[in-house]
Image (spheres, helix red, strand yellow):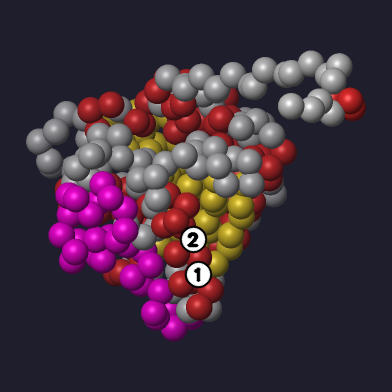
Amino acid sequence: MTTDPKNANRSVQPSAAPRRAKTPAEKVMPAVVYQLPGMGAVTVRPNLKYGDVDNPFLLMDIYTPPSLSNNAPLPIVVFIHGAAGAQYKPKDWGLFQSWGRLIAAAGMVAVMFTHRLGYPKPLLAEAALDVNNALDYVRSHADSFKADANRIALVAWSGGGPLLSIAMRDRPPFVRCLVALYAYLDIQQSPSHVENETPESLKIFSPTSYLQEAPSAMVPVFVARAGQDEIPMMNDSIDRFLAAAVAANAPLTFMNHPVGEHGFDNQDDGNRSREIIRAALTFLHTHLGAGVEL
């Protein structure tokens, strides 16, 4: 065996230690990495019972700006969490509480509610009922928190993405735009969904199924992708949606985070994460007519 003289005196560097897996609390409790003035002064109405389903965990929190005036009512941003299960109280996680404050500080009303979407059994039909019940409650009570029942956006994270299909299928005029943050947008090839749902359900709850309308009939969609997403088939799902959306000439806004992990909005405190969050806020302002400078 011969030795390369150029490397003869070079020490061998040990390989980098594998990254320690984060605990569930380390993933969901940190706050969103983008901040706005006034977040600490936001008003929160917690633990509202929004439907008649017999489940003590199906509750809602509503976040409103620090000072509500007698001016025009504010638009509403409804959050749809991932497949956590209502019993784990996602509305109380630091991620969603801070997003609620962020949206309210940006001059909009934020709504965070728990629903029955689960894992490994998705319970898509049950969760869809919860989403519709939440929307009905918010719209019927909008006057009580000075909000506009006809200017609503849906924002979904992770496993909550399939529930955006409700608005894409029915196209209610009060839903003005959709935001998907590292979220499933086509579940027809996702193993956990395929194993637990019928082919018909997989199609119904895949947002890709609703990209055949005329572009003028489609609701605008903002999609953010985490380039280093570790969730199986997540980016494959997003990539199929993006290809179909471009082919359909859909009103699409897309941002990619090349080094972002699943949950980059509260895990990766870097310029790209903040840029994407700020862009999502601007998208919401534009399509909801919020009329507040960010």
Residue 161 percent across, percent down from the top left: 38, 52
Q: Amino acid at mark 2?
A: Asp
Magenta segment main secondary structure: helix
| Residue at position x 89%, y 25% in the image | 5
Residue 71 percent across, percent down from the top left: 55, 50
- The residue labelled by disc 2 is 239
Residue 145 appears in the picture as rendered:
no
Residue 181 appears in the picture as rendered:
yes
Q: Which residues are magenta?
A: 188-217
Q: Nearer the viewer, residue 230 or 292?
A: 230
Q: In the drawing, what numbered circle is on residue 226?
A: none
Residue 149 percent across, percent down from the top left: 38, 56
- The residue labelled by disc 1 is 243
| Element on which disc 2 rests | helix
| Element on which disc 1 rests | helix
**Dot 1 and dot 2 residues touching (CB under 8 Å):** yes
Residue 198 percent across, percent down from the top left: 15, 60
Query: On the picture, is 185 further left or further right than 56?
Result: right
Quick check: 94 above or below 172?
A: above
